[in-house]
Image: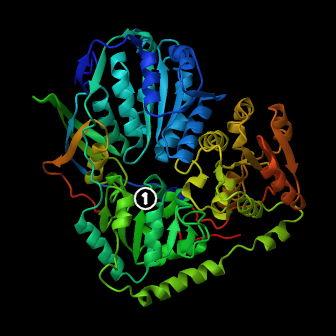
């Protein structure tokens, strides 16, 4: 492997955790949220979605990093940028400490 | 999760007593209400109901010769005008041909509404003729997208689509319109709830105060500005702040023009092909004030070596950029314009210029030291044409308000390094996606959006072939675009990288079998002429600028000329290679 290629290769950062994402009941929102999580470098370990009395949905998703310098706060902000995502936050304990920055 | 069935759940009220109208009518009327005057499109089966109504509207339709051309023309129009662009295509291949333009608009944060026809609702999901799931395909590269299920949703949906495209950090929005919905006639209208998300207007006063304190404490402060300055309408506020603080400025590719190229506080573009004075300043600064930029890898080089001694103030309307790539000491969200206007670090304290003067002296001595020797380089290249000098001279002889669009490759970097810009809307380039084939359609879109301004497209012999069919669009509508085609008979940037990083193993970069471009231009009935030597350049520029209609200046340049300086990928910006 050349030096150039090595520079572009990175290993998992070890970040994992559970996110709670609140979604409006609008077509496409669930797949948009899950797609964002995956494209930003995370694998799902568990996905659970339930409808609330106000009609919105609670999406609980346990995720694990598959590579790259990530942290979950940034992922939450990227999710909240999506239309019809009401909120996104980390919940519960994470297995390993997030890598700073 | 259920999907919205009868109509999208944004609807809060149903009116049932309106004039009967088809989905296509409702779509175009809603677009007219958004103030759209020009749409760029290409008809086809699934979008035919819309084209059936189109002649009865006030909209001017520009028939490009490929849907990718439509999309990029809409981007050029949006970037030249500051308004939201609109592109229209049919289902299947029409829609997929838009994908590159959608991605381009996404990565450069350009507001464009893309509308695609779709097969009838009952055929969706059956692999019908010309059916693709364009909403699924484009999901990662749109700001938002819709599939229209009910024509009564269209007015509210279109209003929201244009709002979303332009608000906050702009971007592309897709509306996928099934043919049966376009044909369906309805007396209903669905009122949509207002868009619910509230965003902060600007950074908190606490954070503004923290940022001001950091600026006061810094000995080596530096502005790092990007495309957000223009998109956030913050040019005047940036210039005022720079004048007040006298802090040196470096710019990304998309930030060019935010300060005039010859501004006394401006050091130049940073990054992979940035100027030495700019890159050295970044490496040595102790405070980086980032405004409307996003630490793109082409700007930063190896990220963990970028501005290694600096604290960071980051201003961006997109809060998801906060500490995404570089930890931020103070983040100011909301309007860049308001944040720049609010920052006044020396409001209550006299400005100690002496504190930063040694830093300023160092920065600007380097700018002087590394100034380009155009005449010397041209002498070395003689009798051939030295492209950077041609571009330098062209941009200074063109009217001050001229817009330059460009394609992607060596010429794109030469334009960034050597052309004069005094407004960021003067420079339209595919910065994020790096789309070859962008320049010509973006140029025609820009010219239609800004008909009183001179628009010049600088292209390369690789890039222009990717959307050369749009020469016919120039002819069809008499769009007086001025094209400078820098022809080195090669895919020059790839060739340069193969020379520098791949031991001169030149692989599939030779284009010496190019067509005769002047004859190609003439075949499209575009005035075309050839410039072969440096002696012919001045007369060529004169003719280019004087020609009333569309014109192509084909310039033969040295195939071995490279773009310098160059930061090798994955390396620090301090490691600039030179000729």
Quarter holding the N terminus of chain B is top left
- For mark 1, give the secondary structure: loop
Q: Nearer the viewer, residue B246 or B29?
A: B29
User: Is B2 located above or below residue B376 in the figure?
Assistant: above
Mark 1 = which residue?
B292
Q: How many marks?
A: 1
| Residue shown at 42% from the left, 45% from the top | B170
Instruction: From the top left corner, tell me how far across and down residue B49 is, in percent.
Output: 51, 13
| Residue shown at 33% from the left, 82% from the top | B217
Would you call the spot at circle 1 few (<14 residues within 10 Å), some (14-19), or many (20 or more)?
A: many
Q: Is residue B486 visible?
A: yes
The color scheme shown is rainbow
Please tell me in which quadrant of the rendered image residue B182 appears: top left
User: Is B248 located above or below residue B337 in the figure?
Assistant: below
Instruction: From the top left corner, tell me how far across and down residue A35 is, in percent.
Output: 34, 36
Q: Is residue A2 visible?
A: no
Q: Please indicate whether residue B572 sits to the left or right of residue B494 in the image.
A: left
Q: Please indicate whether residue B207 sits to the left or right of residue B44 in the image.
A: left
User: Is B3 located above or below residue B360 in the figure?
Assistant: above
Instruction: From the top left corner, tell me how far across and down residue B501 is, in percent.
Output: 64, 59
Please tell me in which quadrant of the rendered image residue B172 appears: top left
Q: Nearer the viewer, residue A101 or B134?
A: B134
Quarter holding the C terminus of chain B is bottom right
Instruction: From the top left corner, tell me how far across and down residue B489 is, in percent.
Output: 79, 48
Q: Please indicate whether residue B370 sits to the left or right of residue B108 in the image.
A: right
User: Is B93 located above or below residue B478 in the figure?
Assistant: above
Outermost residue toward the left in this view = A53
The subunit letter for the residue under badge 1 reads: B
Q: Please indicate whether residue B378 sits to the left or right of residue B54 in the image.
A: right
Outermost residue toward the bottom in this view = B354
């Amino acid at each position: 492997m050349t030096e150039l290629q090595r520079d572009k290769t990175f290993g998992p950062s070890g970040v994992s955790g559970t996110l709670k994402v609140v979604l409006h009941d609008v077509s496409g929102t669930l797949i948009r949220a899950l797609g964002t999580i995956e494209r930003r470098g995370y694998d799902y370990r568990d996905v659970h979605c339930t409808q609330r009395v106000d009609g919105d949905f609670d999406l609980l998703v346990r995720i694990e990093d598959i590579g790259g310098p990530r942290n979950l706060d940034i992922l939450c902000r990227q999710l909240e940028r999506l239309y019809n995502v009401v909120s996104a936050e980390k919940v519960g304990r994470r297995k390993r400490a997030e890598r700073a920055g | 999760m259920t999907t919205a069935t009868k109509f999208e759940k944004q609807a809060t009220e149903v009116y049932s007593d309106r004039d009967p109208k088809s989905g296509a009518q409702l779509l175009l009327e809603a677009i007219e209400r958004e103030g759209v005057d020009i749409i760029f499109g290409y008809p086809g089966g699934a979008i035919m109901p819309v084209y059936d109504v189109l002649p009865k509207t006030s909209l001017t339709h520009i028939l490009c010769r490929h849907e990718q051309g439509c999309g990029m023309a809409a981007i050029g129009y949006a970037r030249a005008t500051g308004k939201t662009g609109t592109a229209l295509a049919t289902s299947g291949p029409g829609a997929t041909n838009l994908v590159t333009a959608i991605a381009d608009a996404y990565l450069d944060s350009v507001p464009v509404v893309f509308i695609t026809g779709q097969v009838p609702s009952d055929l969706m999901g059956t692999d019908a003729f010309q059916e693709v799931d364009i909403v699924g395909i484009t999901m990662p590269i749109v700001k938002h997208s819709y599939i229209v299920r009910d024509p009564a949703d269209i007015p509210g949906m279109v209003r929201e689509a244009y709002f979303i495209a332009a608000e906050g950090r702009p971007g592309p929005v897709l509306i996928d319109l099934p043919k049966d919905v376009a044909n369906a006639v309805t007396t209903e209208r669905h009122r949509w709830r207002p868009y619910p998300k509230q965003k902060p207007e600007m950074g908190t006063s606490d954070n503004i105060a923290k940022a001001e304190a950091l600026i006061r404490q810094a000995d080596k402060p530096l502005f790092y500005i990007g495309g957000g300055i223009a998109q956030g309408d913050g040019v005047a506020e940036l210039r005022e702040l720079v004048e007040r603080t006298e802090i040196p400025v470096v710019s990304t590719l998309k930030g060019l023009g935010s300060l005039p190229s010859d501004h006394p506080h401006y050091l130049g573009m940073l990054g992979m092909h940035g100027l030495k004075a700019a890159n050295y300043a970044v490496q040595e600064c102790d405070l980086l004030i980032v405004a409307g930029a996003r630490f793109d890898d082409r700007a930063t080089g190896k990220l963990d070596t970028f501005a290694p001694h600096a604290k960071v103030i980051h201003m961006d309307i997109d809060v998801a950029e906060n500490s995404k790539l570089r930890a931020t000491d103070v983040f100011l969200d909301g309007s860049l314009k308001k944040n720049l206007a609010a920052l006044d670090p020396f409001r209550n304290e006299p400005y100690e210029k002496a504190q930063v003067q040694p830093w300023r002296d160092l920065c600007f001595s380097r700018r002087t030291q590394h100034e380009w020797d155009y005449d010397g380089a041209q002498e070395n290249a003689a009798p051939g044409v030295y492209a950077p000098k041609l571009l330098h001279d062209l941009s200074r002889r063109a009217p001050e308000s001229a817009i330059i669009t460009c394609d992607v490759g060596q010429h794109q970097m030469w334009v960034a390094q050597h052309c004069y810009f005094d407004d960021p809307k003067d420079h339209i380039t595919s910065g994020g996606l790096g789309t070859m084939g962008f320049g010509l359609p973006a140029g025609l879109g820009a010219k239609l959006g800004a008909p009183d301004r001179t628009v010049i497209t600088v292209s390369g012999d690789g890039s222009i072939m990717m959307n050369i069919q749009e020469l016919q669009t120039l002819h069809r509508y008499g769009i007086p675009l001025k094209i400078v085609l820098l022809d080195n008979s090669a895919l020059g940037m790839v060739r340069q990288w193969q020379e520098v990083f791949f031991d001169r193993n030149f692989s599939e970069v030779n284009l010496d079998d190019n067509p005769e471009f002047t004859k190609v231009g003439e075949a499209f009935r575009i005035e075309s002429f050839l410039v072969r030597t440096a002696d012919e350049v001045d007369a060529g520029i004169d003719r280019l600028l004087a020609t009333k209609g569309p014109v192509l200046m084909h310039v033969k340049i040295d195939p071995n000329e490279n773009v310098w300086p160059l930061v090798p990928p994955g390396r620090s910006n301090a490691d600039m290679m030179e000729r």
